[in-house]
Image (tube, rainbow, N blue to C red):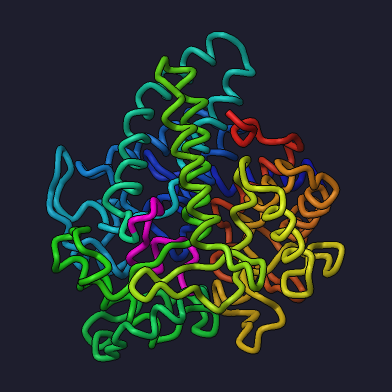
Amino acid sequence: MSAELWNSAAHVLDANWSADHMVPSRQLYPHQWSWDAAFIAIGLAYVNPNRAWRDLRSLFEAQWPDGRVPHIVFDPGTAEADYFPGPAFWDVPGYGDRPARGSTGLVQPPLHAVAAWEVYRRAAAHGAACAHAARAELEWLYPRLVAQQEYLTGRRNAGGAGLASIVHPWESGLDNSPAWDSALAAVPADLDLLDRFRRRDLAVADAAHRPTDTDYARYVGLVLAYRDAGYADTDLAARHDFVVECPSFNAILAAAEHALARIAGVVGADPAAHRQRAKEITDAIVGRLYDPRTHTFRARDVRTGMLSPKRCVNGLMPLILPDLPVEHAAAIMAEAESARFGLPERTGLPVPSYDRTAADFDALRYWRGPIWININWLLRRGMLLHGYHDQAEDLRTSMLRLVHRAGHFEYYHPDHGEGIGAPAFSWTAALTLDLLADRSVPAYARAA
């Protein structure tokens, strides 16, 4: 299996390379996506490290002056009609050396410092010359990664407790997760918007697999409101309809600080501030997003102060934090091993994106039930970090078997493992390479 799977994954990444960046999939996603680029770099480093660095550089060349890294960087060679919402809809003004309408104004989880450290770590293992070249890449990225973190921990600290808030479900990376349902209920669903702005995802994907029209109308409305306010982040909780603290987004935010502490040691910067911020974010996640009644982590609606009632896979992601208290790590593992998520020893498959026992569990619809490799990959790293080695190996094996059997799909059916969504999906291929190559505890995640 290993050689065949390795070659197929490498082929996907080669086919999806586009000039200076990787597209997630030729079928549905013709531009560059932010957290995709991070996952992709981690695996791409095994077969083409120069492209791994170039993909990260290409993304950060589009960084805004305020530090935000846009969730999509648009390929100017792709026609407006080929993707919605495209450059004209976002109408981002020019900034720095960037042309107008070159990106979106939203962000995605800041996994990029973790990716940069992993790409460097692989390069450094190949001798002094490779390590020297990789250090130069880190020196270019480091201040930009710091600016990204400062934007998220500063301007996006809408709740005032040190956590970053997302202002749109797309920023979470878990676009239509049930975790957002209660907060989205307060967002107007103007279906007339879908007459003005026609969905193009349904031309190439089954409607049963994608967000509903009601949710999509809310997504469009939220973008228009944020855009028309100049993408400003002032007084978010008072003037924006969706402001949420996500446990997954913030766990990645803290993990990025741990990675930056290691990167700082390479480039000659002080790692102490990164360690301190990682601790502060972790403490805030535990203090604000942990529900002691159900022993689970939940998304918090900053506008109402309420925790989401839904048990979603983003609640498992704080396991990636090295300083997560032991009792909270154990609670996450109990949730992951329960009938709600069913680790491989229960189902033979990786964990789904939502509680299997919930009445609204949907085996086909995007983040409302299907299995995603990237989230399971993160969960496995957390298991290794906290000493759950047997479970981590079972999860690794189940992911590789799933991809080998079904192919490098965007996501998978949670009951029988059929591939769903876009085929030849880049982060699935990239993370397959990492799973095949690396069984060790991730170096970035050890306490810095």
Q: How many marks?
A: 0
Magenta stretch contains residue 174? yes
Relative placement, left or right, of 2 versus 259 is right
Residue 307 in view of the camera: yes
Where residue 254 appears, x then y in whole percent? Answer: 49, 44
Tell me which residue sits at (62%, 47%) in the image.
324
Magenta stretch contains residue 385? no
Of residues 260 and 426, the one drawn nearer to the viewer in this rendering: 260
Of residues 137 and 314, the one drawn nearer to the viewer in this rendering: 314
Q: Which residues are magenta?
A: 160-176
Q: Residue furthest top?
A: 128
Relative placement, left or right, of 90 versus 128 is left
Q: Quadrant of residue 316?
A: bottom right
Q: Main secondary structure of the magenta part?
A: loop
Where residue 264 appears, x then y in whole percent? Answer: 45, 23
Q: Quadrant of residue 311?
A: bottom right
Of residues 214 and 46, the one drawn nearer to the viewer in this rendering: 214
Tell me which residue sits at (18%, 43%) in the image.
98
Where residue 49 appears, x then y in whole percent? Answer: 53, 29
Where residue 170 appears, x then y in whole percent? Answer: 40, 65
Of residues 89 and 255, the one drawn nearer to the viewer in this rendering: 255
Residue 79 versus residue 153 in the image, above or below: below
Residue 109 versus residue 276 in the image, above or below: below
Tell me which residue sits at (83%, 69%) in the image.
347
Q: Quadrant of the C terminus?
A: top right
Tell me which residue sits at (41%, 30%) in the image.
273
Residue 358 versus residue 442 in the image, above or below: below
Relative placement, left or right, of 181 versus 355 is left
Residue 72 in view of the camera: no
